[in-house]
Image (tube, helix red, strand yellow):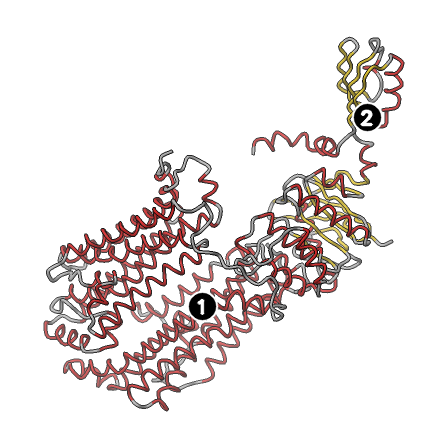
Amino acid sequence: MIDAISVSGLVKTFGRTRALDGLDLTVRSGEVHGFLGPNGAGKSTTIRVLLGLLRADAGTARLLDGDPWRDVTALHRRLAYVPGDVVLWPNLTGGEVIDLLGRLRGGHDPKRKAELLERFELDPKKKGRAYSKGNRQKVALVAAFASDVELLILDEPTSGLDPLMEEVFQRCVEEERERGRTVLLSSHILSEVEALCDRVSIIRKGRTVETGTLADLRHLTRTSITAELVSPPDGLTTLPGVHDPDVQGTRVKLEVDTDKLDEVLKHLTRAGVRTLTSTPPTLEELFLRHYEDEAPAGMAR
Amino acid sequence: MNALAGTGQLLKLGLRRSRIMLAAWVYALVAYAASTAYGFKSLYDSAESLRNFTSGINGNGATVAMYGRILVPDSIGGITAWRLAALGGVMVGVMSVLLVVRHTRGDEEAGRLELVGAGVVGRRAPLTAGLLVGVVANLALALVTAVALIACGLPAAGSVAVGLAWTIPGLFFTAVAGVTAQLAETAQAARGIALAVVGVAFLLRAVGDAARVSWLVWISPIGWSQRVRAFGGERWWLIALGVVVAVAAVAVAYALVERRDLGAGLLPVRPGPAEAAPSLRSPLALAWRLQRGALLAWLAGFAVYGAAIGAILKGIGDLVKDSSGTRDLLAKLGGQRGLEDSYIGTVMGILGLIAAVYAVIAVLRLRTEETAQRLEPLLATRVRRVRWSAGHLLFAAAGPAVLLGVAGAAAGVAHGLRTHDLGTQVPRMFEAAIVQTPAAWVTAAIALLIFGVVPRFTPAAWGVLAVFLLLGQMGPVLKLSQAVMDVSPFTHVPKLPGADLTVTPLAALTAVAVAVAAAGLVGFRRRDIG
């Protein structure tokens, strides 16, 4: 199967800032792909290159087997885009914007539109300036989901939605997947990515640092374990893969590389387990590990 | 919490944010006042010429409607005050409305007030600070105007009265804007309602003066400003009365601010259609939706202005008949016809520049849409860049032609009706106006070139237009060489109706506009968006 998006070695500079620094991204047809990274990592820049809004300085980008810069009209017929910051025209109603975008894209299904308006609880009669941030995002989401396209490019589409609407959004994305459509979902809401995405790419400072399925990536993470044992454990702290052990008598707290979990558990059962709590690795943890060294800079902001 | 807490901070912030806008308004209005006084001083140096001037003006209905009657006829100061009161009053009103709405409803709509409101800021503080920005602007304007007029050699008391007379409409419309900012939910609507009140005030005075119905003049703050009678027994109490009325209007604004939520207005927001009209399916249709309101407003303005030009034209002849001295001078200029021709030529040249302002605004809309991030979603559809820009550029191209055509036709009709010669006057005026179009196109094309190639500098298009304006206005005075004057496209427009209609310069200007615009579009196709 042909990849829906394949980007390699993408470079884009703005003045002296290197927004993209050799970025790679592969999105397979029919998958929901999570695109993760902190603010300013280059997610939106990548998407804008893919939409033909920016011209890359180096590297290659292919989109639905076309050139995003040259084949604009042919490609854009087949994709829908939701920007992170949806700005509407103050004197057009939400319904008008949805219809306009649909028509400019090449037509949309009015029945599906009506259904989506209901599910997202969006009043299409309000003027653009009267919508809140979340409602502006709903306008763009309805316009995108109502169109009959192969690829959805969503740039942090849920940052203004409440939890109920977030759930509606997740269900819509699931449906798109069932219909065989491809979704590129840029986000920093990790629970959303964990719930929806088949594969994820994590980028940082314009480069891809990890890419793979969630299962692949979990191998790179640690499980935390808290246990009460019958007798104090022996030699636990020196086992390979164990981190930050905290042993106080028969109480044990530690973190373990997920692929070494089996051996550590065997070791614990030899000492006799009374209680055991194990927290599976979260994407958040993975994410934080990649950005740990940036945290102080983030705090200073 | 004290309802006014934080007013000082907000006022400081407001003055800082608007310092350039404020200085530009004060500078422009003071320049208007000083150049009026200076011009009159050099034109009417004898008592006889002054008398001729005033009797000519007060006998001309069109001029009286525009500027009112000269109430203090025997001094340069008197006619200066007459000239400044009506149109100056409108401009002061516009300044006050724009400043106050910007700092009240404008900030609130943009959400900036919410940010501020979370701090230690009282409920009435934002309104108070916004009103104070208007008050500061008006007082600064009054002071600098008085100083400038005194520097022009006019008596001190009258000069101060002229400055303070401006504060009557100034403070009144400051308060009106404070009220409309509470009523409307958007800055656009608040501005629109307040500016409509300015327009009504001007119209009441114009009709009252022209038809000699004095109570109509007396219910307009712009009328009061005239009747201060600067340089001829000043009525200071009128200025005090102006302050009282403004304070009363401010009280209304305060009462309203207590009755509403942050972000909300008191006027209902009408819902729109749930579905787009079938016609809204192209970038052109979208551009029409976004630009039609402005175009219609400009059309109305050009029609009224054109009609006013035509209506005053016959008066110019009457003015000349009364004055024997100027009659001889005029004979040398080509007689009555020559005077009319040169007047029309000058006025149409100015109209051409104003049409260029419209064209530049239409082009700059491209940049506004881009920086507001409304362009991105459109370009993510099948719409290509050139097709999208073509929608807005159609307004830049057709707009000036339509505006100038309407103004010319209106001038022709107004003048033709008074001279019973519609058949000649309409085409004569129409031609004189419409020939300006290619020069406006060149200006718009330069704006497009900047937008396409160096988008960050798009506002520099205003600088280009300012250079053209200065070359046209100051060039002859400074005796600039023809080569320098030729930089402005407006230099090349044939000065109709006096000169011959030559096609070559018009075709050349059009060709330049097309070439420059094409270069701009090529640049836009190749550059990054955003």
Disc 1 chain ID? B
User: Residue A126, image x and y in percent?
Assistant: 56, 56
Q: Local crowd at mark 1 within 10 Å, few (<14), some, or many (≥20)?
A: many
Is residue B392 left or right of A74 when viewed as pictured?
left
Pick the residue in front: B231 or A57: B231
Residue B222 sits in quarter: bottom left
Instruction: Indicate whether A278 appears above or below A77.
Output: above
Q: Local crowd at mark 2 within 10 Å, few (<14), some, or many (≥20)?
A: some
Instruction: Indicate whether A225 appears above or below B108.
Output: above
Residue A93 sits in quarter: bottom right
User: Residue B502, image x and y in percent?
Assistant: 43, 85
Q: Residue at x 71, y 58 (%)?
A: A146
Residue A101 sits in quarter: bottom right
Instruction: Indicate whether A69 appears above or below B48.
Output: above
Pointers 1 and 2 within a single chain: no
Pick the residue in front: B501 or B235: B235
Return the residue at label 1. Answer: B358
The amino acid sitting under disc 1 is Tyr
Q: Residue at x 17, y 75 (%)?
A: B53
Quadrant where the image shows the C terminus of chain B: bottom right
Residue at mark 1 to residue at mark 2: CA–CA distance: 67 Å
Q: Secondary structure at mark 2?
A: strand
User: Residue B86, image x and y in percent?
Assistant: 25, 65
Q: Secondary structure at mark 1?
A: helix
The amino acid sitting under disc 2 is Asp
Quadrant where the image shows the N terminus of chain B: top left
Disc 2 chain ID? A
User: Residue A21, image x and y in percent?
Assistant: 70, 44
Instruction: Indicate whether B452 appears above or below B301.
Output: above
Return the residue at label 2. Answer: A257
Q: Which mark is residue B241?
A: none
